[in-house]
Amino acid sequence: MESFQKKSYWNAAGKAGIIFGSTLFLISLIGGYQTIHTEPSGSLLSGSIIASAAGCLFGAFGAVLAVRFYINEYGPEMNIGTGAIIGLVTGLFISLIYQLLGLIWPLIDAAYIENLQRAMIANIEMMDLLPADQKEEMVDAIYTQMQNYYSAGNIINGLLLGFLSYGLLNLLSGLLGAKFMGRTPEKL
Amino acid sequence: MNVLYPVNMNFTTICTPDHPKILTKKFHPLFFTVVFPVSVFFVVVAWSPPLLFNTLAEWSGSYQKALLSFVCHQQLSRTWLIGEVPLAVCSRCTGIYTGLLVGLVIFSYFSVWVNKSVHMVTRFFFVSTLILAGDGFANLFKIWQTPDYLRTLIGGFWGAVIGIMLVTAMVVINKHK
């Protein structure tokens, strides 16, 4: 009797999601603290230059690692559709871990949100080229966002937007990972 | 019966003097249902703020900015402005997403030849990634400062290469005598 092994991609996607979600959060945290400890220059989020350079698009490639984990677990036999699904699920995990850590961190450093808000507002107030009414609107927007940091709407919004951006980009990278690292059954 | 699985969504036959065999290409259904719509989605989201908003404050609170803030730093000093409103992503990411879509459109037409040179595609990927990362780190460590148009071009090159890779992944080439 032929043995049947059920190939679940949740394990691979979960592991890659945890690694990438945590790394992204760490990068954004470095950027956040740099924003807090940098003199306001008038450039929006000027202190987050390290985070921006390292984090920009980094999260889109979590699926490549997830596909590697999947291949290590089950072998290279997979089609590109499986890679796409692994990517989508990896994006879900990345978004989840990133949001979760983002909610936990202010409990560890209670002044983090307030300091970040102050630094961001100070930066906006230094923008000389911006008209006063626009400055005020942007400051209000940041203030409202930070005050509602723990609101259900803000959390759900962050999760949905994170899932959409990371999910779709990881879907593409998962597909590429499956094509270039995996083997279709007929090639084996 | 192969009715429920529409693999032959786009079926093209090509025969050239260089390739006397008839080459047929068929796109995987994911190309039309996922890859192409996702690319269009990111380009539309990235370019739409100047068309929809009049002020920087509106841009700052927009969904386009919030959505792409996960994958781009969106620093105003490094972002293209149309009128007074910036795009939703920085100049480099604008190049990447636009290059991806352009690459998909152009190279899906030439997919037979692209598919026959997969090894070249992977080389292009490594070279373009090296350029993209090298320029990014050089700017980060202030070795040099790349102007916005060059950032867009470098990003566009990388995006187009990813487009070629996706086309390669999505096309199955068959040879018939």
Image (tube, coloured by chain):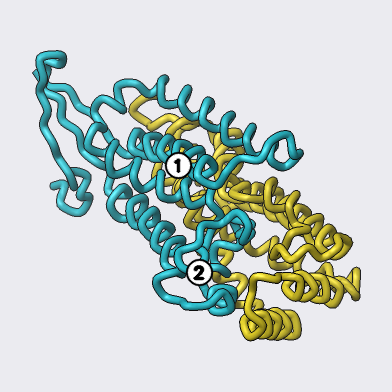
Chain colours: A yellow, B cyan
- Residue found 41% across the figure and 26% down from its top: B121
Rendering quarter of residue A126: bottom right
Residue B76, position as x, y percentages in the image: 61, 61
Q: Which mark is residue B31?
A: none
- Chain to which the residue tagged by mark 2 belongs: B
Residue B163, position as x, y percentages in the image: 39, 40
Rendering quarter of residue A149: bottom right
- Residue found 29% across the figure and 36% down from its top: B107
Residue A36, position as x, y percentages in the image: 85, 65
What crowding class fits label 1: few (fewer than 14 Cα within 10 Å), some (14-19), or many (20 or more)? Answer: many
The residue lying toward the viewer, choosing from B176 and A31, is: A31
A33 up-or-down from B26: above or below: below
Q: Quadrant of the C terminus of chain A?
A: top left
**Element type at mark 2:** strand
**Element type at mark 1:** helix
Kind of residue sitting beneath label 1:
Gly
Kind of residue sitting beneath label 2:
Val
Residue B177 visible in the snapshot: yes
Left or right: residue A144 versus residue B125 is right
The residue lying toward the viewer, choosing from B103 and B11, is: B103
Q: Quadrant of the N terminus of chain A?
A: top left
First in sequence: mark 2 vs mark 1: 2
Left or right: residue B96 versus residue B113 is right
- Chain to which the residue tagged by mark 1 belongs: B
Q: Which residue is mark 2?
A: B85
What crowding class fits label 2: few (fewer than 14 Cα within 10 Å), some (14-19), or many (20 or more)? Answer: many
Residue A61, position as x, y percentages in the image: 57, 44
- Residue found 34% across the figure and 57% down from its top: B37
- Residue found 18% across the figure and 47% down from its top: B9
Q: Which residue is mark 1?
A: B156
B134 up-or-down from A145: above or below: above
